Amino acid sequence: MLTVALPLYRMNQIAWVAFEGLIRQEKSPKWELIVCEEKHEYQCGKQLIKQYKDRLKKVNCIKTTYIELDEHVNLAKKWQIIGQKAKAESIGFVMQSGDCYPHKYRLHQTYLYLTDGFEWYQETRGFFFDLLLKKLIQYRHDTLNVYDWKTALNMAFNIKYARSIPETELLRGIDNFIFNHCQCEGLKKIVSVKPMAIG
């Protein structure tokens, strides 16, 4: 099974993007969803999960967990908290952003690669919701001048690395921080692919 980690902050107007993609998953393995966010006026709260719970079950989501924090923490800390709450039988940690629309085979494709021995999986294309433009915009790693970036989109990795994410004061570059942590812990097999589907 997989753990889908969804950290949120000030996402009450946009987190539906992630949920709408998750309820459209096809051929997905068993998975759990863990949402982590702070108490504040723009929080999504448990109500958002309740709204989607039945539809999540239909696509093999066997458990939903909501973690409410009393104070603001950085993104790395949220990944750390979620990693420590993941079910023991989980094999993969799927990093899901609140503004990222996962394509319908995201969990299926991730699971195939992780069970084939790859320890880090990422995709070169996908969609984000632009709040200013109020529409989905496509991310294409191959067209950006970011070849020094180690990470791309729709990242996932072996759960063993998620259970030991260290503390950091970083506010930016968290994806690279997580990747570097995994490498320091022995990460070997890495794959970066075009997704099986975009929408």
Image (cartoon, rainbow, N blue to C red):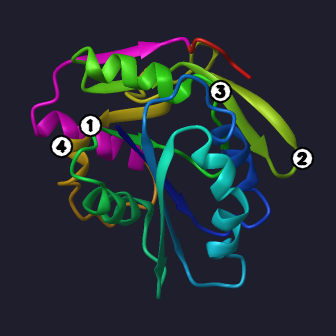
Q: Which of the marked residues, 3 or 2, is nearer the chain's N terminus?
A: 3
Q: Three-letter amino acid code at disc 1? A: Ile
CA gap, disc 2 and disc 1? 35 Å
Q: State left or right for residue 93 relative to residue 44.
A: left
Q: Residue at label 1?
A: 91
Q: Nearer the viewer, mark 3 or mark 1?
A: 1
The residue at 54%/11% (across/down) is 194
Q: Three-letter amino acid code at disc 3? A: His
* Helix, strand or loop at mark 1: loop
Q: Which of the marked residues, 3 or 4, is nearer the chain's N terminus?
A: 3
Q: Is residue 71 above or below residue 132?
A: below
Q: Residue furthest bottom?
A: 70
Q: Which mark is residue 103?
A: 3
Q: Residue at label 2?
A: 134
Q: Residue at label 4?
A: 160
Q: Which mark is residue 116?
A: none
The residue at 44%/30% (across/down) is 29
10 Å neighbourhood of mark 3: few (<14), some, or many (≥20)?
many
Question: Which image quadrant: the C terminus?
Answer: top right
Question: Which image quadrant: the N terminus?
Answer: top left
Q: Three-letter amino acid code at disc 2? A: Lys
* Helix, strand or loop at mark 3: loop
CA gap, disc 4 and disc 1? 8 Å
